[in-house]
Image: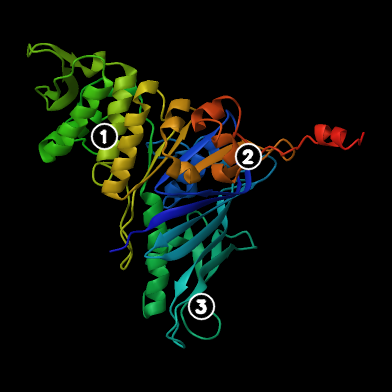
Amino acid sequence: MARAVLRELRLTAFKSFAGATLPLAPLTVLTGRNSSGKSNALDGIEVLARLAGGEDLADALDGRRREGGPVRGGSRGCAPHGTTSFQLGCTVAVDGEEIVFDVEVQVEPELRVLFESLAGPAPSEASPAIERRILLEGHASPDGSAAVDAAVYNGKRGRNPRYSFRDSRLLITQLPARLVPQNTADRAVIAAAAAVTGALRGTFHLDPVPHLMRDYVPGRDTELRRTGANLSASLGRLRQDDLGTFNRLVALVREVADAQVRELIVTESGLGDVMLAIREGKDRQDVTPAREMSDGLLRFIAIATALLTSNRGLDIDQGLLAPGGPPAGVLLVIEELENGLHPSQAVRVMRLIQETIRELDNQVIFTTHSPALLNALPGSANDDVIVCYRDVDDGYSHLDRLTDLPGYAEAMAAGRLGDLMSSGRLVRPEERRTDFAEFNRLLGIE
């Protein structure tokens, strides 16, 4: 069965962005100078993913009753400076069809959904043809009541029926409870909403924090969390359930570690808690526990574990899909992949990412400043390198494909991608100026 996959993020009015689009391929590399807006773009994905879980806006954005805490900057930080709302959208692909979702959320004076729309393929009772239609469109009540009035496509002639939704959470998360499917049009609307929420819930932001990985954790806490705090328990389950993948991870650790790694082990306390350790020498007592491992090695193990188990071992709350909703893929988001990674291992890490994308049919997006990582990218991936930069005139962040930048072909002919970017080339569009001085001198033109 075809899966719901995120293909595009629209940063219509969000933080430092205005009218920007981030295309999402199986592998997307986001690069740019400091403060260019890379983290803001990833925050856009995070906000939509949280909202798609069906939480109230305040819980999702400001961390009320939420273990993960608020999004970076909280709800008010999502609105561009000088405004009181933010706008985001995404495009989801399912079996060759596209579903388009957009939302505007007010952050002041109170949090509420101002506008929401869903568009996609829609069957009609009057025609056998499947056409693209607005499946749902809602606007906040102008009288100040806590409601959004929305029209929902029903496949019939005349005006679509209208429903009232709460303005404190996304309409598409409320739709399955409000719309009782009576025909193919109703089922198409519910399936489209489920495809969007499922694809967004499949987003996993990995932000490994090494010092959280050094303690014993409950052995039953096995789904890897975004901080990697329960890495030891995740590896314990992996060793038990999939020894082949576990051994593959061990081989990777041997490649990147300076010490002679014989095996990874998971030690268990008398209370059932577990801790990762490395056996380095021939002596069975020659063991280094997680509390003594380097930050870089722990971070690498967490990233490799997430990549190798992204189809089954991550703490992703995908929720209950509505009847008829397609399964969702996983989008693994990693900020500053090079942290703790020695440049000599860049090629191996890139190869692992490409292998897992191909094997598990999932997506990866990561940000990087690393020349070594960029140099390790195959040329075929250059079209999926997105350059983020601030426009000196309007002050907004912009996103351009690397291959669309002026002078791309000429620059690439002069060197490798990472080396070019570290020297200041291909980090933003530059106006192409041709110096005609010598030509004019030959023609006698002053």
Q: Amino acid at mark 2?
A: Gly
Q: Amino acid at mark 1?
A: Thr
Disc sitting over residue 407 in the figure: 2
The picture quadrant where one finds residue 143 is: bottom right
Question: Earlier along the polypeptide chain: callout 1 or callout 3?
Answer: 3
Report the label total.
3
Q: CA distance from mark 1 to mark 3?
A: 48 Å
The picture quadrant where one finds residue 32 is: top right
Q: Which residue is mark 3?
A: 161
Asked whether 60 or 318 is in front, the reply is 318
Disc sitting over residue 290 in the figure: none
Question: Earlier along the polypeptide chain: callout 2 or callout 1?
Answer: 1
Disc sitting over residue 305 in the figure: 1
Q: Can I make out residue 428 in this image?
A: yes
Quadrant location of the N terminus in the rendered image: bottom left
The residue depicted at 27 percent of the width and 48 percent of the height is 360
The residue depicted at 30 percent of the width and 57 percent of the height is 320
Callout in the foreground (2, 3): 2
Q: Residues within 10 Å of mark 1 (few under 14, many from 20)?
A: many
In this rendering, is residue 26 above or below 126? above
Look at the image and name its color scheme: rainbow
Question: Earlier along the polypeptide chain: callout 2 or callout 3?
Answer: 3
Asked whether 254 or 182 is in front, the reply is 254
Helix, strand or loop for disc 1:
helix
Helix, strand or loop for disc 3:
loop
